[in-house]
Image: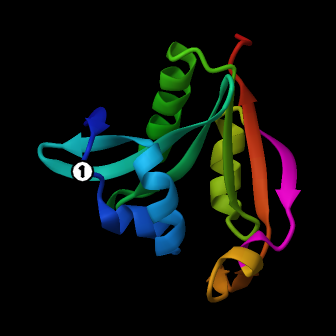
Amino acid sequence: MEIRPTDRPSRTLLLQADESEASVNDYLPRSRCYAAFEEDRIIGQYLLLHTRPFTAEVVNIAVTPDRQRQGIGTTLLQHAIRTARKAGFRLLEIGTGDSGTGQIALYERCGFVRCGVDVDYFRKHYPAPIFENGVECRHMVRLRLELFRE
């Protein structure tokens, strides 16, 4: 597996991580995509977005269903941390739905800490309800990692 920048992210993976076409279309042109390749096949990817001075956000991260639970998401997130640190960012943020307990656990295992909740984010900004693990996804859980420590 090799992780490298790409100008041709997988649309399927983008929409796997974020069901809103409008949301993806908003941040995609402003983001940098890094993809995990096996030969010529993208098996995972993330988008890194410069949001504020000294701050970047992973706005989309996904792994193909047939390769999930094999450490690829962790490897992508660790790559994002190194990439952001090398670029001079001091803070790396990420957000996910409150029903995404697996994603939240992954982010916390990688050193991110919860820092806030955008109440009813998905009800306000998405055209239809989203359900995950049988639970409506309503709130966005915000997490951050301070990059100047280590």
Query: Which picture quadrant has residue 64?
Result: bottom left
Q: Is residue 19 magenta?
A: no
Q: Residue furthest bottom?
A: 128
- Image spot of residue 119 (x, y percent): 87, 67
Q: Who's the residue at 71% across and 32% down the image?
A: 111
Magenta segment range? Answer: 113-122
Which secondary structure type mostly characterizes the magenta part of the structure?
A: strand
Q: Classify residue 97 by image quadrant.
A: bottom right
Residue at left offset 68%, top offset 39% = 93
- In percent of width and height, residue 71 lies at 45, 44
- The residue tagged 1 is 8
Quarter where residue 113 is shown: top right
Horizontal side, residue 6 vs residue 109: left or right: left
| Residue 6 sits above or below residue 98 on the image | above
Name the residue at 63% across, 47% down. Answer: 106
95 w.r.t. 5: above or below: below
**Tag 1: residue type?**
Arg
Q: Residue at x 48, y 63 (%)?
A: 24
Q: Quadrant of the C terminus?
A: top right
Question: In this rendering, does residue 123 appear at all?
Answer: yes
Q: Say whether residue 103 is left or right of residue 87.
A: right
Give the colour scheme of this rendering: rainbow
